[in-house]
Amino acid sequence: MNAKNTDFGTFAQDVMLGLNSTPKTLPSKYFYDAKGDKLFQKIMALPEYYLTRKEYDVLEGQHEQILAEILALDKTFNLVELGAGDGMKTKILLRYLAKMEVEFTYFPVDFSGSVLEELEESLSFEFPALEVKPIQDTYRESLKKQVWENGKPNLILFLGANLGNFGADEAKNIIDHLRVGTKKGDFVLIGFDLKKDPQVILNAYHDKQGVTREFNLNLLDRINRELDADFDRESFSHWPTYDPVSGECRSYLVSQKSQEVTIGALNQTFEFEEFESIFTEISKKYSLSEISHLASLGGFEVKENFMDSEGYFADVLWVKK
Ligand SMILES: C[S@@+](CC[C@H](N)C(=O)[O-])C[C@H]1O[C@@H](n2cnc3c(N)ncnc32)[C@H](O)[C@@H]1O
């Protein structure tokens, strides 16, 4: 496939809108340039970042049960994955499907062209016979376009707690896109990080090695690089918070001094007061009752909640009614 970089105009426009709003914000989807992709892979291997390990355990231990429903149809199908990333956990499912000699097409959707290129290359190495059709697009746009729709049943994967990167209202909006973007009998498998001891959650976003800090600051480096800006990264600190009521873990970059930042591509200078923050990411944690509520909003029936032994993470299987 021909990977295109993030559209310069959209990136510039989103940065302009975010830094002109009060409080200042930057959209988390821009974390994932080539350096951000690598940093996220390091985050997934951190001892504090339990999410990847727990979801890996769920998929490794229960993939047969997870795939039993779609395989029971005994038909070829589309395996669509929203925000596929490096496909590390998806490969557990792909290996089982390959072993069972199941016929299906894999449609990894990701906003990042570089991540899709790497994924395609690693898949062609491990699964040379697999039909892969990468789609470089956003979750919402891909669900609107449904380029995979060919009348076959769909299993839509939305792993890695990606839905948690949206606040409550936006998550409902994504579920609404899933409602419109699926037909009766289609399955979705969504990963949710569950509410748990707040300290365990906070540690996952404040690791001792400082990789999450680097990941957050890379957003400023990226703006410097791509939009000709002069952010002094050392004058911003990484600050995660967790609210156990809303389940929202939020990451901020806090300006340690009063300063001005110029973004050449926008021809604009932004003022920061001392300790003014930029909100960069939300990672919402869910209870099982909130998850069931989302299923009903999307017109889905809950088939099963697959969880790890500590109840940290759930991959929930829904079917469209
Ligand atoms: C946190 S990673 C998770 C990857 C993988 N699903 C996993 O569980 O390991 C999120 C991935 O989703 C992609 N992504 C983030 N926001 C997106 C959006 N709005 N539309 C499409 N892809 C997005 C990123 O490029 C990244 O590869």
Image (cartoon, rainbow, N blue to C red):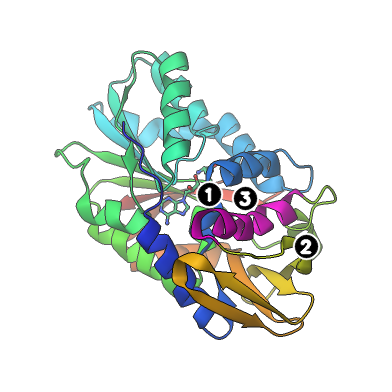
Q: Rounded to the nearest whole Å, what is the CA distance between mark 3 and mark 1?
A: 23 Å
- Of circles 3 and 1, the one toward us is 1
Residue corresponding to mark 2: 234
Question: Is tag 2's residue or tag 3's residue first in the polypeptide sequence?
Answer: 2
| Residue 64: in magenta span | no
Q: Nearer the viewer, residue 60 or 180?
A: 180
State which region is magenta.
211-228
Residue corresponding to mark 3: 313
Q: Rounded to the nearest whole Å, what is the CA distance between mark 2 and mark 1?
A: 21 Å
Q: Residues within 10 Å of mark 2 (few under 14, many from 20)?
A: few
Can you tell me whether the CB of the residue at mark 1 lies under 8 Å from the nearest atom of ligand 1?
Answer: yes
In this rendering, position of residue 14 left or right of residue 19: left
Q: Residue furthest right?
A: 208
Q: Position of residue 261 (x, y in %)?
A: 63, 73
Q: Which quarter of the picture shows residue 204?
A: bottom right
> Mark 3: which amino acid?
Phe
Identify which residue is drawn at 55% across, 35% down.
59
Q: Which quarter of the picture shows residue 242?
A: bottom right
Is residue 303 visible to the viewer in this orientation of the structure?
yes
Residue 32 badge: 1
Q: Main secondary structure of the magenta part?
A: helix
Q: Position of residue 82 (x, y in %)?
A: 40, 46
